[in-house]
Image (cartoon, rainbow, N blue to C red):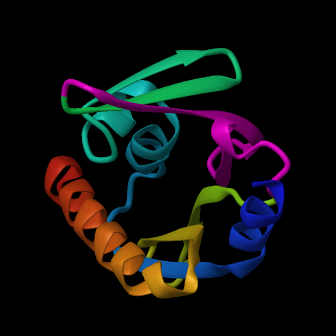
């Protein structure tokens, strides 16, 4: 069992996605990616935070907890799923600003098994479309 789990962890690929947002308010974007109420608008149906642990709820039965492992205000927040102990995988939301246009880009870093990379990209595309709608980006 441990060997199988290690094999699955080793097979994961890093995915780096970038989404230009026509957003000039860094506060709106930062709140959307780093606060329970902001994440509830586009990432999960419900979000509860207890200091460094955040629990995400989808529908009536699905939930998953993640630990905040790194954060810099108005820059990035990095999570690691608590059920992946021993894994180096994480997911991260990073925001950057274009000085020329004053628009923001949301970068998402995640990991997926090779056969799930395209599904993961489609999932993030859909989630970010919801974010754009909810926040007016």
Q: Is residue 53 magenta?
A: no
Given residues 16 and 63, the one toward you in this image is: 63
Q: Residue at x 70, y 46 (%)?
A: 84
The percent position of residue 120, horizontal first and vertical second, equals 40, 73
The percent position of residue 28, horizontal first and vertical second, equals 38, 44
Q: Residue at x 50, y 80 (%)?
A: 17
Q: Main secondary structure of the magenta part?
A: strand
Name of the residue lying farthest toward the front? 1
Is residue 66 visible in the rendered image? The answer is yes
Is residue 22 visible in the rendered image? The answer is no
The percent position of residue 98, horizontal first and vertical second, equals 53, 78
Q: Is residue 27 above or below residue 119?
A: above
Apparent side of residue 49 relative to residue 36 in the rendered image (left or right): right
**Number of callouts in the render?**
0
Task: Name the quadrant containing residue 97.
Answer: bottom right
Q: Which residues are magenta?
A: 60-87
Given residues 123 and 30, the one toward you in this image is: 123
Q: Quadrant of the C terminus?
A: bottom left
Q: Residue at x 74, y 43 (%)?
A: 71
Q: Residue at x 39, y 52 (%)?
A: 25
Q: Is residue 51 above or below residue 13?
A: above
Given residues 110 and 72, the one toward you in this image is: 110
Q: Is residue 63 magenta?
A: yes
Q: Quadrant of the N terminus?
A: bottom right
Apparent side of residue 22 relative to residue 114 in the rendered image (left or right): left
Q: Is residue 135 above or below residue 127?
A: above
The percent position of residue 15, horizontal first and vertical second, equals 58, 80
């Amino acid at each position: 069992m441990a060997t199988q789990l290690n094999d699955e962890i080793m097979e994961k690929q890093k995915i780096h996605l970038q989404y230009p947002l026509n957003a000039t308010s860094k506060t709106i974007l930062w709140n959307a990616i780093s606060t329970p109420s902001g994440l509830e608008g586009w990432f999960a149906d419900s979000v509860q935070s207890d200091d460094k642990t955040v629990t995400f709820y989808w529908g009536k039965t699905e939930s998953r907890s993640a630990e905040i492992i790194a954060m810099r205000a108005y820059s990035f927040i990095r999570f690691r799923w608590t059920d992946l102990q021993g894994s180096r995988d994480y997911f991260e939301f990073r925001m950057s600003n274009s000085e020329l246009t004053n628009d923001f880009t949301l970068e998402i870093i995640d990991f997926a098994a090779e056969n799930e990379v395209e599904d993961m990209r489609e999932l993030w595309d859909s989630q970010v479309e919801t974010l754009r709608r909810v926040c007016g980006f």
